[in-house]
Amino acid sequence: MDISLPHELETLESTGLVLRGAESPELEYAFKHSLVQETTYGSLVRNRRVELHRHVAEAIESLGASPEANAAILAIHFKEAGLPDKAFGYAAEAGDLARRMYAHAEALASYDLALHLAPELAPGASSDRLRRVYSNRGSILEVTGRQAEAEENYRAMGREAARMNDATMQAEALNRLATILAVSLGRPDEARGLLGQALELAERTSDLGMIARTLWNQGLTNRFLDPETATGDFLRALEIVRRPDCQALPPEAGVRELEAFILADLLVTHEVSGRLRASKEFGRQALSIFRSLDNKAMVADVLGGLSMLSQLSGDPGEALRLSHEGQNISTSIGNPWGIVYNGWLQLDVGLDRGHWDDVRSKGEALLGPAHEVSFPVFVGAIESILTRVYRLAGQPERALEHAQAGLGPLNSPIWPIWAVWGFGNLGLAFLALGRIEEAAGVLEPIFAIRQGVVPGFQGYSVAAPSILEYALTSGQIDRGLAFADWLISIMDEEGQIRTAAEVRHWRGRLHLAKGSADRALTDLDQARDAFRTIGIPMLDWINEACRAEALAGRPAEAQAARQRARTLANELIAGLHSPDLRDGFAKTVVGVLGRETA
């Protein structure tokens, strides 16, 4: 230190230009006002400013503390000192540190500085680091819902890779661009056009990780179009990333994270095809890896998938636990995708439990963020739940409005596997209005027994009751029974307990309509046991009313079932606070049980 510095600082302090700050662990001074600082800085000639920035940067580097802790300030000082290579390295490091802490704004600022410096770097310098800057910056934009900016980031990455003739960086840019086009922006055809180029580049460089990433991306373009083809691509990619030579690659190659992404998407393709047991196992493996990597956004995403599987498997308590954890994580890191995904699953449980006031208010509040997430299925799912709320509350016109609003997002030509869901929901609303011909128009195309793996089988979790109600209403009893048998055989094999119970309820009603009271009672008794175990009063009350009808030859038991139906219905009515929902549902109950219900 210049021996005169303490005296000069004292002089400046006495004039009021600087103020003494903390004295421990180091003595600190600060300018009294930012204008004083700007004026003083501006009065320095450029060469002197450059020299001072270099001295400050070197002094900070020489401190005992880790340079990483001061990376952001070192990046600025080295930039002003005219040393772009060092400034770039520190800016990238500062961005990585902020990203790991989920400080998105700070990370983006540091990555932006690094990209601003990139044209000044020596030829070929830090190409791997530049690739990671673009990739990490794009990931942050995706997580925070800024999909259009992420797309432009990856396009810029591709342009820079082409300028540098860096095949690895170019392949990664194509892959990441394909991911966002296929998953978030609904443009899988564009994505497919990029992946052929990416695979050629990856094979040219013998980059195993990039070959696996490209196969994974090929799967992404097909997972909601042809889940079986997608599963094949995912399994090939998984085989590559699990090879010892691929696992031996350095951590920055991202092989472990890619393995988790592949597992997460195997969860999805198996889930949408109704193969719940395999889906759960892939999900558990993915969750374990994402937790170990502290990838909070994907932890929340996988929690959402596992929550849905728990709900279908008849464990709503576990479904809520997982979805609340996923939503809390998503909120903490500002991830709208995870907030909507996990929030939708909570609505599903609330619907079963009769908490329709909360389901309606939270569902309507969630629609806004769902429209911004750029994944229309979320909008369709929430509209589907609102459709059922209004159907249950005896407001069929409102139910139809929501069913129509949800049909477009669920019946997209680029994601056709959700059509069953959308048509089933719309058919439900038409049935509530007594518009049988219109119900037939949307339900008949999905009222068919299929062989092998059914790509959109998940949609029958929503559509099956509508189809079976239509079969009952239109007098197609035997056809409805065969359809119910088919559904139950698959659902029982895969442990889809919740929906299998609802299908059994409807099969019991079909048997009752056919005059087979004993068969009806077998189904209705099994449905009752499941509804009580899981906790689904929404269905339990009407199931008891049907049991009373099936028990017509046993008056005492029939009366007991009818009384239980009244009790359950009254409890549901008492739990509703909105007059329109309470009064509407009360009318529905009176129509089934008569005016003895409170």
Image: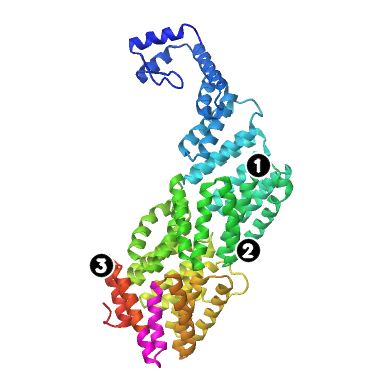
The amino acid type of the residue labelled 1 equals Ala
Q: Report the predominant secondary structure element of the magenta stretch.
A: helix
- Between 447 and 236, the one lying in front of the other is 236
Which residue sits at x=64%, y=25%?
A: 122
- Label 1: which secondary element: helix
- Label 3: which secondary element: helix
Question: Residue under circle 3?
Answer: 579
Instruction: Confirm or deny contact between disc 3 and disc 2 (CB under 8 A).
Output: no
* Distance between mark 3 and mark 2 Cα atoms: 47 Å
Q: Earlier in the sequence, mark 3 or mark 2?
A: 2
Disc 3 residue crowd, few under 14, some 14–19, many 20+, Cα 10 Å: few
Disc 2 residue crowd, few under 14, some 14–19, many 20+, Cα 10 Å: some
The magenta span reads 537-560
Which residue sits at x=49%, y=72%?
A: 499
Question: Residue under circle 1?
Answer: 253
Question: Residue under circle 2?
Answer: 228
One can see residue 222 in this view? no
Q: How many marks?
A: 3
Q: Is residue 41 left or right of residue 295?
A: left
Which residue sits at x=41%, y=89%?
A: 551
- Between 299 and 36, the one lying in front of the other is 299
* Distance between mark 2 and mark 1 Cα atoms: 28 Å
